[in-house]
Image: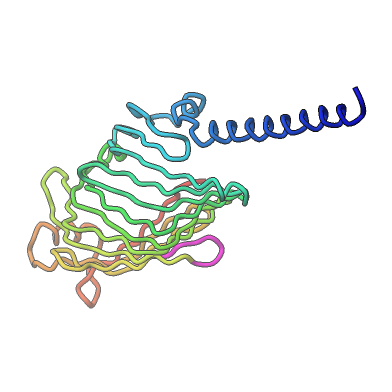
């Protein structure tokens, strides 16, 4: 065998090896792209009180059926992960939660710094579905909550910034009789140093309310509002009277604060 034969032989093996490496990486990419979500979830410890019936799709585009959290039925949870954001050390996903009485759509981004950002968040929920979350309270409630929050964020250092509007319609409290309160809107705005403020106002109904709320970085939640009933002598006016005396405008001042976390 002369030198030219040896070179031809060596060159042929290098070409084969190159194709073998390309084929291997293409197959590896195929496995990653089509990695079943069920395999990943089977190795993940879910939070307590969170359950689901079935999972389908891949880790990049999947669906959970009959999701429940603390007795609340969330319905179907869909997600679409963006693999390109992983190159930027971010986890980005489009998430939707849908059932027959509620929905939520948002674009979720989690960065390596511990910041969670939500964009274009829209939701609507029947408040009666959330009763299991407030088990033990001396009253129950009914109504509907909906909202639109263009940009909101949460940080591991308890920085919370909410920007958007929350609407409450046909709100009612039951303790034990039902007391209809009406319709309300809260406009949220992120402040400096991880705080959030909200302006409260009613948009029609038996309860006349205007005020402010705030949430500080240390978890202190405060509400300052003035209340009045639009119907003199009603059961609502009698209930408001227990909060204090009326001021010169005929309204009762409500001030409350408590810690959401420590």
Q: Where does the magenta region start and end?
A: 191-197
User: For the point 35% across and 66% down, which residue is it?
Assistant: 187
208 or 84, nearer to the observer: 84
26 or 194, nearer to the observer: 26
User: Which image quarter: residue 120?
Assistant: bottom left
Q: Is residue 202 visible from the viewing direction of this image?
A: yes
16 or 68, nearer to the observer: 16
Residue 157, relative to residue 43: is it above or below? below
220 or 20, nearer to the observer: 20
Residue 146 x/y as whole percent = 27, 56
Residue 140 x/y as whole percent = 21, 43
User: For the point 50% across and 31% down, which residue is it?
Assistant: 35
Q: Is residue 156 visible from the viewing direction of this image?
A: no
Residue 171, relative to residue 100: is it above or below? below
Which quadrant of the figure contains the N terminus? top right
9 on left or right of 131:
right
Check residue 164 for magenta coloring.
no
User: For the point 30% across and 38% down, which residue is it?
Assistant: 76
User: Which image quarter: residue 250?
Assistant: bottom left
Give the tally of numbered discs.
Answer: 0
User: For the point 19% across and 51% down, which residue is it?
Assistant: 143
User: Which image quarter: residue 230?
Assistant: bottom left
Which residue is situated farthest in the bottom direction here?
Answer: 248
Residue 260 x/y as whole percent = 44, 48
């Amino acid at each position: 065998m002369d030198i030219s034969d040896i070179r031809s032989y060596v060159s042929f093996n290098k070409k084969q090896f190159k194709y073998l490496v390309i084929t291997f990486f293409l197959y590896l990419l195929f496995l990653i792209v089509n990695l079943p979500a069920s395999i990943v979830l089977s190795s993940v410890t879910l939070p307590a009180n969170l359950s689901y019936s079935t999972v389908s799709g891949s880790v990049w585009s999947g669906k959970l059926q009959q999701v429940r959290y603390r007795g609340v039925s969330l319905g179907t949870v869909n997600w679409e992960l963006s693999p390109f954001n992983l190159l930027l050390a971010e986890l980005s996903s489009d998430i939707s939660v849908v059932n027959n009485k509620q929905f939520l759509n948002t674009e979720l981004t989690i960065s390596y710094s511990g910041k969670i950002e939500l964009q274009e968040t829209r939701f609507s929920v029947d408040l009666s579905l959330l009763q299991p979350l407030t088990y033990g309270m001396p009253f129950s409630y009914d109504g509907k909550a909906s909202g639109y929050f263009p940009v909101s964020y949460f940080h591991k250092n308890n920085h919370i910034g909410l920007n958007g509007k929350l609407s409450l319609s046909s709100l009612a409290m039951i303790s034990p009789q039902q007391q209809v309160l009406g319709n309300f809107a809260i406009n949220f705005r992120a402040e400096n140093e991880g705080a959030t403020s909200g302006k409260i106002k009613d948009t029609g109904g038996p309860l006349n309310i205007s005020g402010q709320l705030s949430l500080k970085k240390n978890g202190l939640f405060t509400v300052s509002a003035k209340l009045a009933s639009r119907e003199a002598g009603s059961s609502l006016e009698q209930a408001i009277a227990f909060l204090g005396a009326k001021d010169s405008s005929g309204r009762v001042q409500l001030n409350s604060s408590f810690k959401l976390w420590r």
